[in-house]
Amino acid sequence: MKYVIDSKTYENHINDEVHLYGLLHQLAFLAGKVKDERDMENLLDTAKRYGEIAEEKFAAWCIPGRYLVFGDRADLAELKAAELTPLTDVLKAHDRERAEKERAAEAGDPAYIISASDFRMLVGDLHDLFVRALATERHLTEAETEKDLRRIQKRVSGYERWAKRLCRSWQLPKDGSEAWGRDTLEDCLRKKMLKPYEESDGFGGDCCCDLCGDYSCYDDYDL
């Protein structure tokens, strides 16, 4: 059975291997330079410290001690489950996502692509809108005197200018000459920030992604 490993887990293993190689290489270098008793003491101290580092890394790997004695691969089952994902599971999840995209396209609900910068800007605008609305509602609820209401009125007096800037950013009618609703907002945001997803935006070729280059999306997977 083939497996997929998370890139971070893979890189951590590579870093550990490089680190251990560096320790071993350094020990070999120091051993070759031993000339007297003092050099030997330094070598022993270094070897002891490097041994402690190796033990710490081994503990972090969660490799069963039983495996060191008997070498039975069955003892690695828990470690394998924690670090690896069966390729068939990845492909099945991929098939489900692809089927959902096709279903959405057939239902008239096409997929879109949004750039990271536009997404961050949209999230920021929505956050500001949410905070202003929530703060205004809370202040109105807590207002008890006419003075409180005047204070709220003064606070929100600048909201109109902010709303016009937001409308300009979203390319919405901002001068009040044209009424608009949810459909207009959706249409403006779609034109400004979204790009229709096309097959060419994927991995190209005759397959829908790089996985399909070697494994058909329509295979039946048997574990």
Image (cartoon, grey):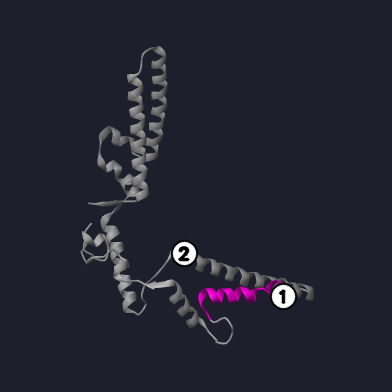
Label 2 secondary element: helix
Q: Where is mark 2, residue-wise?
A: 117
x then y, percent, for residue 48: 40, 24
**Residue at position x 64%, y 74% from top?**
159
In magenta segment, residue 122: no
Quarter of the picture containing the C terminus is bottom left
Using the image, determine if residue 25 lies above or below residue 11: above
Which amino acid type corresponds to the residue marked 1 in the rendered image?
Gln
x then y, percent, for residue 157: 69, 75
x then y, percent, for residue 93: 31, 62
Q: CA distance from mark 2 to mark 1?
A: 34 Å
Circle 2: is it few (<14), some (14-19), or many (20+) Cα within 10 Å?
A: few
Q: Which residues are magenta?
A: 153-172
Label 1 secondary element: helix
Q: Is residue 221 visible?
A: no
Task: Give the mark nearest the N terminus, 2 or 1.
Answer: 2
The quarter of the displayed image where residue 75 is located = top left
**Residue at position x 38%, y 24% from top?**
47
**Residue at position x 40%, y 12% from top?**
37
Which amino acid type corresponds to the residue marked 2 in the rendered image?
Ser
Q: Is residue 7 visible?
A: yes
Q: Where is mark 1, residue-wise?
A: 153
x then y, percent, for residue 96: 30, 67
